[in-house]
Amino acid sequence: MRAESLVKIISSDFYTGVPDSQLKALCDCLIHKYGIDPKHHIIAANEGNCTALAAGYHLATGKIPVVYMQNSGEGNIINPVASLLNDKVYAIPMIFIIGWRGEPGIHDEPQHIYQGEVTLKLLEDMDIAYFVIGKETTEEELSAGMEEFRAVLAAGKDVAFVVRKGALTDAPEVIYKNGHTMTREEIIRHIVRASGEDPIVSTTGKASRELFEIRAAHGQSHGYDFLTVGSMGHSSSIALGVAINKPDRRIWCIDGDGAVLMHMGSMAVIGANRPKNLIHIVINNGAHETVGGMPTVAGSIDLVGIAKACGYPNTVCVDSFEMLDSELEAAKSRNELCFIEVKCSIGAREDLGRPTTTAIENKRNFMEYIK
């Protein structure tokens, strides 16, 4: 199924979402067609944010919006779907496009397995009718499904297209880049060198994969690190929980800009608690790079200013390895909560692997190390 065909059949003129690798063809199609245009296409902070934004679009225009996401984002939409959109409340119609990671019978990473099992059940529980798009789905079948959906939408209910792996294809080529030169993997290598044997909590996506491979290349223990392979946006809160309860250990958090945006309220909680043993590092490439490079708004906001306003006593932005090394050493000597934003290029090695230990092994090794 060509991504452009899906867009044409749905025939909506407003999309908002959080990018997903399984929906990359759709995301590239929307970027090519609209770019980032508040009238037609907005990449939002998290899936609940998208849903509320789309609700506002419907209230203002009376038209049907589309929200796209990975199925891991279903948890973030439950509240607005149940307490805002539902036909027992405001009856706001909406179309969801959901990438089905972890579909039963299809190999995927551990963080997607259970989510994949409950993807359709969650939609049923939220009273959202769904149509599954696979590689074999024809445009005629999709058009027929959309026609059935129009009656559901007219009744103030919500619908979803659930997209199987490889089902969407043939998007226009879009190149994502920025003007920064430092690579994320090399940045993490510098952090590893500075942190020594201190525990690290790392964020979802390629950052954790790169950290794992750096440890392996150096012959270091993977027990030093908690890899937040799922639960995007929550690594800094995990690090806060560890730091509060291990006050004699310096704790590092390697975060990403997309993750920080997803649950930015966590920065306010960290700043209010001011753990002296936490160093929060945000590698900012202004992109959802792990799922394809689509832009975030972090390229145009002041993360350092936000951290300072949240109560972080030490905040800085660096854009060179010389500055990075200097600030990492300064953070180690302060014995105060620190925030370091690192400007980063978009991209990763083609041969980047994945952790060879299981999530349970990672948890046990990390808990044993910090015990």
Image (tube, rainbow, N blue to C red):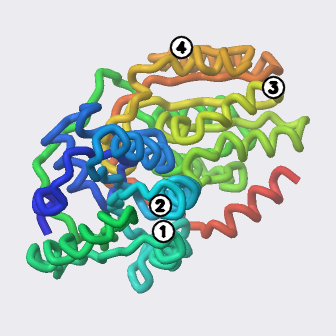
Residue 237 in percent (x, y) is at 71, 42
Residues at badges 1 and 4 in contact (C-beta under 8 Å)? Answer: no
Pointer 2 local density, CA inside 10 Å: few below 14, some 14–19, many at least 20: some
**Pointer 2: what residue?**
354
Q: Is residue 147 above or below residue 328?
A: below
Q: Is residue 28 above or below residue 282?
A: below
Could you tell me the amino acid type at mark 3?
Arg
**Pointer 3: what residue?**
274
Query: Which numbered marker is on residue 109?
Result: 1
Residues at badges 1 and 2 in contact (C-beta under 8 Å)? Answer: yes
**Pointer 4: what residue?**
323
Could you tell me if residue 61 is visible in this image?
yes
Which of pointers 1 and 4 lies earlier in the amino acid sequence?
A: 1
Pointer 1 local density, CA inside 10 Å: few below 14, some 14–19, many at least 20: some
Pointer 4 local density, CA inside 10 Å: few below 14, some 14–19, many at least 20: few
Residue 6 in percent (x, y) is at 16, 62
Which of pointers 3 and 4 lies earlier in the amino acid sequence?
A: 3
Q: Is residue 151 above or below residue 181?
A: below
Q: Is residue 102 above or below residue 234?
A: below
> Which picture quadrant has residue 78?
bottom right
Per the model, the C-alpha gap separating discs 1 and 4 is 36 Å
Could you tell me if residue 229 is visible in this image?
no
